[in-house]
Image (tube, rainbow, N blue to C red):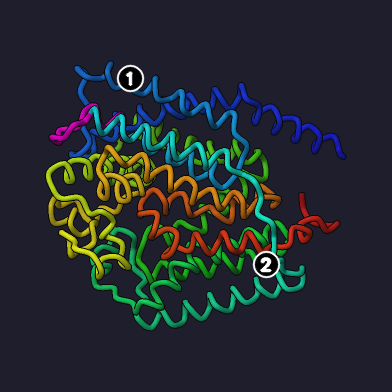
Amino acid sequence: MSAPSGIMQHLQSRLDSKPALTILLLLHSAVTCLSLIKVATFQSYIHFSGERVWIAVAVAVAFSVVSLLFAAARFSFGYFAGFYFYTMILGFLWIDVFSDYSYDRLLAGLSAAASLVLLLLPVLFVRAPFRQLVVLSNAGFEHLLTAILVISVGTIAVASTYNFRLVAIANIYDYRDALAFPGAVRYLIGWVSSTLLPFTFACYSLLGHRWRAGLVLILLLFFYPITLTKFAFFTPAWLITLAVLSRFLEARTSVITSIFVPMLLGLVVIAVTGAAINSLPGKYFDLVNIRMMATPSSALDIYNHFFANHPLTWFCQISMLKPVMPCAYQDQLSVVMENTYGFGMINASLFATEGVASVGPYLAPLTALVAGFILALGNRASAGLPQRLVLISSGTLPHVLLNTPLTVAMVTHGTALLFLLWYVMPRSIFQRPGLPD
């Protein structure tokens, strides 16, 4: 081991220690709340008042104790997803104190906090590996990666016949409502862009196939003119960011800094410059601090208000269940929210959909517990794989889980498919000599 390599490993170990992680986690909680104060100056549906700030601070300080679980738990897929959920629920608890919507805000806050804790117990601590009954050979796995590239190219070619527009990000909403893909193509787009290509990028990166990894990033970029989503546009940059972070930091530290650093940068830039939201610093703040983090928290506020005054769904919003059970809502819930509040298509996480919308705040913690055990299947399927591989290959999914119901994330975006890929992977392929560290 060379001296620089030894120094780097020592530094990584120090940053990943429990004291260092604890400090980082508490700083992250503080930045999340400070960011929401600034967000309130730009977003009319998020409020802040000096009269209630001490209540919000007390709630945030009390809830931040939950973040210490991430200093104690080992890295896993559930750790990655769970930390993003923690940030979202902390944001909601802050927003809940100042909300102008009329619903039982104390009940909603207690329900959300309990839901997160019950979800975290399995996603952080259920880790026992599955017995691998089916394992691909090393050569077979390499062929699988090639097959994924072929499927991806075919999906892009077919989807491009339905839509392919090179437009600026600011103009995507002028065209997106007109997009229509057949069901099979829509599922393929979700699987390839959210799961298959990120998985392939992670594998090629760790195997040292840099040109193939670069090809994967190019293929991912093609989904932007097809889907006209910011998610597609920024996915390649996000995967590169995770690859770089995890190259220099341990996996747990990488997860925390992947939110903390971008959000802190947005807060500092917008506070120092005082820029307008349509300026370059303002657009960064809008993308990271508002769209990526504050919006999922705010969605839970809106769903609590709506379903405090409207019938619950009892899961009838799930496409397979809607035809066989009575349902008060014929449109998707995101459309119902758009028609009611006029904020656009408000998609929301499992806490809002399978939780508040389906069973109400009293039973929502139970659905979160079930969701935790479902997501913990990813921990078990990926046991024994390099932490960097798990982190990078699942890189898009925490964002998906913040903005879509669990059923949509598992099926439409291919989370269940990723679990299967992890399960059949040969662990020995990453133990060959000559691979990059």
Regarding residue 19, the answer to whether it shows in the image is: yes
Task: Kindly identify the amino acid type of the residue bearing the numbered disc 1.
Answer: Val
Q: Residue at x 32, y 50 (%)?
A: 354
How many other residues sit within 10 Å of disc 1, few (<14), some (14-19) or many (≥20)?
A: some
Q: Residue at x 34, y 79 (%)?
A: 182
Q: Secondary structure at mark 1?
A: helix
**Residue 357 position within the rendered picture, expressed as x and y whole percent measured from the top left:** 25, 49
Q: Which label sits on residue 57?
A: 1
Looking at the image, residue 108 sits to the left or right of residue 205; the answer is left
Q: Secondary structure at mark 2?
A: helix
Sequence-wise, the earlier of marks 2 and 1 is 1
Looking at the image, residue 106 sits to the left or right of residue 222; the answer is left
Looking at the image, residue 414 sits to the left or right of residue 333; the answer is right
**Residue 28 position within the rendered picture, expressed as x and y whole percent measured from the top left:** 46, 29
Residue 57 vs residue 426, the one in the foreground? 426
Residue 363 vs residue 161, the one in the foreground? 363
Of badges 2 and 1, nearer the viewer stands 1
Inspect the magenta stretch and tell me whether residue 148 lies in it: no
Which of the 4 image quarters holds residue 106? Answer: top left
**Residue 419 position within the rendered picture, expressed as x and y whole percent measured from the top left:** 57, 59
* Residue identified by numbered label 2: 211
Q: Quadrant of the N terminus?
A: top right
State the count of labels.
2
| Spatial separation of the CA atoms under disc 2 and disc 1 | 49 Å
Extreme-front residue of the structure: 325
Inspect the magenta stretch and tell me whether residue 93 lies in it: yes
Range of magenta residues: 92-105
Q: Which label sits on residue 336?
A: none
Q: Residue at x 71, y 50 (%)?
A: 384
